[in-house]
Amino acid sequence: AFSGVSVYAQGAFRTPLGEVMVDKDFTQKLLNKIHEVSFVPEAFAKEHALEVQIPFLQKVLPSFLLVPIIMGDSSYETCQRLAILLKNAIGERKDVLVVASTDLYHGYDFQEALAFDKETVSFVEKMDSEALFKGLENGQLQMCGGYGVVTTLILSKLLGHDKTKVLCYTNSAEVTGKKEKGVWTVGYVSCAIDKDTPNFIGKVGVPLTVEGETAMLNKAQRKRLLEIARKTIDLYLKTGKKMELTEADPVFNKEMGAFVTLHKDGELRGCIGNIIGKGPLYLTVRDMAIEAATDDPRFSPVEPGELKNIEIEISVLTPLEKIDDVSKIKMGVHGVLVRKGFSSGVFLPQVATETGWSKEEFLSNLCAHKAGLAADAWKDKSTDIYIFSAEVFSEKEVLSGD
């Protein structure tokens, strides 16, 4: 660990793919120009952020010069001063690519990784360098190379680059499939910053998602649906009447399937849903909340006094997609519906995560215990198999930051 900024001042930087020559002229425009910037050789010893990025450049660029920079503990003012120094060094050059390299969340909780990373990347998307810095300083956000990202955001604005796009998000648990708590998880995202021009790759405002998932709702929308579910159950248990409401949000008025799941003391207390949307999403959530609380045949109806001890979870579903090859099923990402004749059964995506089943176990249990079919019915060509994605959120997750 060190404070300040270290600029690599030797002639070449070595990677497993060979040496990359350092741009000495550019380097000299940075070194010792402000008191925070110097060459600290030990800062580059086994530095992961550089080790993982430079080989990519070596693969895609036939030749280039490099200016490696490592940032240690830094103030926001240091980030500003370095950004100005870099802007002056770049001048009118059009051949300079600035790469900020960092991991995101580090910890032992996949769901926590998603929550931390969504908030962290939201500040990158908004190019809010000051809010990002404050979040890193107080521990509400996680980026081990965050000061470099803060500096890059400041520099981008100085250079007139005013749009950020999230190209892809994933994390180690998504890659390995090991999403249970207690497994070390690290978040990763790739972003591009450029001027807002028609040639800028992709679509501005791509939401942060795990690869294979579809982001349909923002935090405010999730919070509102959970509020509808809780108020609906409370009113129905007290009066036997459905809550009358109207929502103007166009997302809420789409026909989407949804499940409402109730947990008490960490145990399932009820779960009912519609796979296929049969009306506006907000009304589906309202109706399924009542069903989960009163009509799940596996449980007695929820008592009014119980509700305060129940946590509500909602799963909003994408449309069904029929598949002819089970290799297309991504465990923990896809829910699955099997149907043969008049028999059918469904598992939500989180079943795979909660049980740790293999794909074969998942499908066999689905057929045998949910659809009432033979355990190997999923292998039968006459069995229809559908997949869907679910955006799953709970009161614990959404309301914890309020």
Image: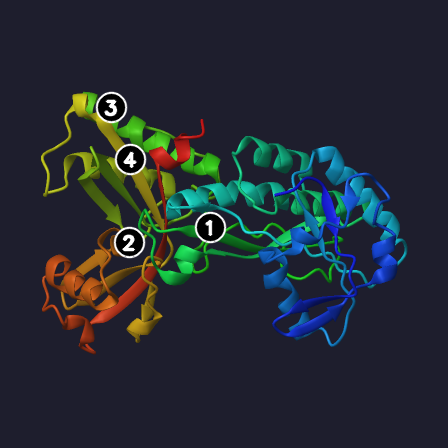
The residue pinned by badge 1 equals 215
Q: Is there CB contact under 8 Å for labels 1 and 3?
A: no
Of 382 and 336, the residue lying toward us: 336
| Kind of residue sitting beneath label 4 | Ile
**Label 1 or label 2, whichever comes before in sequence order:** 1
The residue pinned by badge 4 equals 312
Single out the residue that lies furthest toward the front.
Answer: 42
How many angstroms separate mark 1 from mark 2 (CA)? 19 Å
Q: Is there CB contact under 8 Å for labels 4 and 2?
A: no
- Badge 1 crowding class, 10 Å Cα cut-off, few under 14, some 14 to 19, many 20 or more, is some
| Closer to viewer: mark 3 or mark 2 | 2
Of 35 and 319, the residue lying toward us: 35
Q: Position of residue 50 (x, y in %)?
A: 64, 59
Q: Position of residue 117 (x, y in %)?
A: 50, 45
Q: Position of residue 304 (x, y in %)?
A: 18, 23
Q: Position of residue 266 (x, y in %)?
A: 21, 37
| Kind of residue sitting beneath label 1 | Ala
| Kind of residue sitting beneath label 2 | Thr
Of 103 and 246, the residue lying toward us: 103
Image quarter for residue 346?
Answer: bottom left
- Badge 3 crowding class, 10 Å Cα cut-off, few under 14, some 14 to 19, many 20 or more, is few
Dot label at residue 353? 2
Secondary structure under the numbered disc 4 in the rendered image: strand
Dot label at residue 308? 3
**Label 1 or label 3, whichever comes before in sequence order:** 1
How many angstroms separate mark 1 from mark 3 (CA)? 29 Å
Image quarter for residue 270?
Answer: top left
Name the residue rendered at 77%, 40% in the picture.
Answer: 36
